[in-house]
Amino acid sequence: MAGVAGPLGGVAARVIGSVAEQARSRVPTADLDERDPDYIRESLPGLWMLASLYFRAEVRGLDRIPEDGPVLLVGNHSGGNVTPDTHVFTLAFTTYFGVERRFHQLAHNLVLSMPGLSRLRKYGTVAAHPENARRALEAGAALLVYPGGDYEVHRPSWESAKVDFGGRRGFVRVAQRHGVPLVPVVSIGGQETAIFISRGEGLARLLGLDRMFRLKVLPISLALPWGLNVGDMLGHLPLPAKITIQVLPAIDVREMEIDAAHDLVIARMQEALHALQAERRLPVLG
């Protein structure tokens, strides 16, 4: 049996490596200049109207974001592979500050390599990588990051009001390295756009998705139009849950110890998220 397992293991490793390389080759090279103010100006009114009517979007506290210069916006993330909180906040930020202000969002590589999502790059989305964060902040941009990534965005729906970055602290290092203010952004409603059941971490490991695509989860949910939705690779039709987003006061983490800064950011975000949850009377309806 050991003799069989060895060759099979080698074949599996080669297959996984080949698939991983193909996936990496599909990821577009980050180009901050792909952000297209003219495209944003033309598409913004219709998209913002859709977000306002369908998600009854409400974004508060945009005046707490510095009016110019680089800033790191750190948010909790919700809604599976269809993330209405990102879309709503991007539209609100651009409406408030104008299309000419540089604004970029970091996203998982696979999001940017999916067909039909090139428009995200026109809104300033680039692959989540420290080098892209550096380039955006050095260009004087506002940069939106979601440290929880795919781990947080697929958390069970009954953890809707939980900030869960999975212990990741890189966002603190980014703010310290570049000496920029860190502005927390909390949102609620996204985890009500489907019934998220499990992250499927064990299933992802079993299938080697962590090695192929840097995916630590293979989520399981109940979502339209699929019913049982495993992986959410094709997205889903989100329920029209009310999306509420709150921008918190900036935190200066430059002289703080990393763990202390991380804990402070999480604590303030969690307190604000619990307050947003307390406002909601019913799921989806808000």
Image: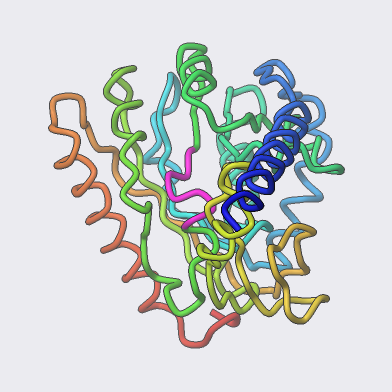
| Residue 252 percent across, percent down from the top left | 22, 31
Answer with left or right where residue 65 lies relative to residue 193: left
Determine which quarter of the picture holds residue 29: top right
At x 62%, y 49%, the residue is: 3
Chain part drawn in magenta: 145-151
The residue positioned 70% from the left and 69% from the top of the image is 230
- Please identify the residue farthest to the right as the structure is shown: 116
Whole-percent x, y for residue 264 in the image: 19, 48
Query: Which quarter shows the N terminus?
Result: bottom right
User: On the image, which quarter does residue 96 sit in?
Assistant: top right
Is residue 201 placed above or below 194 in the rendered structure? above
Left or right for 237, reference 129: right
Residue 183 at x, y = what percent? Answer: 35, 39
| Residue in front for this viewpoint, 84 or 131 | 131
Identify the image quadrant of residue 231.
Answer: bottom right
Q: Nearer the viewer, residue 166 or 69?
A: 166
